[in-house]
Image (cartoon, helix red, strand yellow):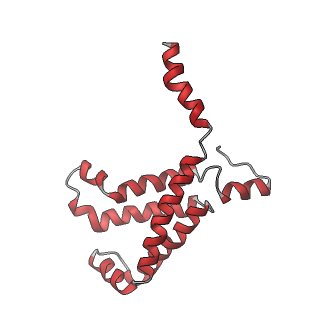
């Protein structure tokens, strides 16, 4: 049993520990890029997006449309850089909850359908980044190192 644990748990763990920096980096770059582009598209089409927000029943659509568009655009850039990561990740996670509730909720006839929405996947990724942080390959980590502070969790 001990050799099984070593082979199937400890060995992969040791190998993965050398690449711990890659998971958060890849997640940040991919979702950051997607949301930077999404936000840019919304910022350049505010009248149509405002109309969509109105139809979805989002409160204060004339205020929320540029706000959410900016969160997506600037939040995406910050995520790609790994700068102040937990803040835009948390804001974007909340945005995904609102998107599910306002635009997709009526189509969610089962847990399988709900979890199949791409917004649910993005929510999970943003929540992970908000909790776990940006990882070692980030400007957040560089700023902490330069300032002499150590992050609470590795």
Name the residue located 27 percent from the left edge and 64 percent from the top edge. Answer: 104
Quadrant containing the C terminus in the rendered view? top right
* Residue 13 coordinates in the image, percent (x, y): 56, 31
Residue nearer the viewer, 153 or 58: 153
Q: Is residue 111 above or below residue 69?
A: above
Residue positioned most to the bottom: 47
Q: How many marks?
A: 0
Name the residue located 57 percent from the left edge and 58 percent from the top edge. Answer: 86
Residue nearer the viewer, 152 or 20: 20
Residue 125 shown left or right of residue 134 in the figure: left
Q: Is residue 141 above or below residue 54?
A: above
Residue nearer the viewer, 85 or 26: 26
Quarter residue 103 falls in: bottom left
**Residue 63 shows in this picture:** yes
* Residue 128 coordinates in the image, percent (x, y): 50, 50
Residue positioned most to the top: 1
Residue 84 shown left or right of residue 58 in the figure: right
* Residue 78 coordinates in the image, percent (x, y): 58, 66
* Residue 37 coordinates in the image, percent (x, y): 46, 71
Name the residue located 43 percent from the left edge and 82 percent from the top edge. Answer: 63
Residue nearer the viewer, 127 or 25: 25
Name the residue located 65 percent from the left edge and 49 percent from the top edge. Answer: 136
**Residue 64 shows in this picture:** no
């Amino acid at each position: 049993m001990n050799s099984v644990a070593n082979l199937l748990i400890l060995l992969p763990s040791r190998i993965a520990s050398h690449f711990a920096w890659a998971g958060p980096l890849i997640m940040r770059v991919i979702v950051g890029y997607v949301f930077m582009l999404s936000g840019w598209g919304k910022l350049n089409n505010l009248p149509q997006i405002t109309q969509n927000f109105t139809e979805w029943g989002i409160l204060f659509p004339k205020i929320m449309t540029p706000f959410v568009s900016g969160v997506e655009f600037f939040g995406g850039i910050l995520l790609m850089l790994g700068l102040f990561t937990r803040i835009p990740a948390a804001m974007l996670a909340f945005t995904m909850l609102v998107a599910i509730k306002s635009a997709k909720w009526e189509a969610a006839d089962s847990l399988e359908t709900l979890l199949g929405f791409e917004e649910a996947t993005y929510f999970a990724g943003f929540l992970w980044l908000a909790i776990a942080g940006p990882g070692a390959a980030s400007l957040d980590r560089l700023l902490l190192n330069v300032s002499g502070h150590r992050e609470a969790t590795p």
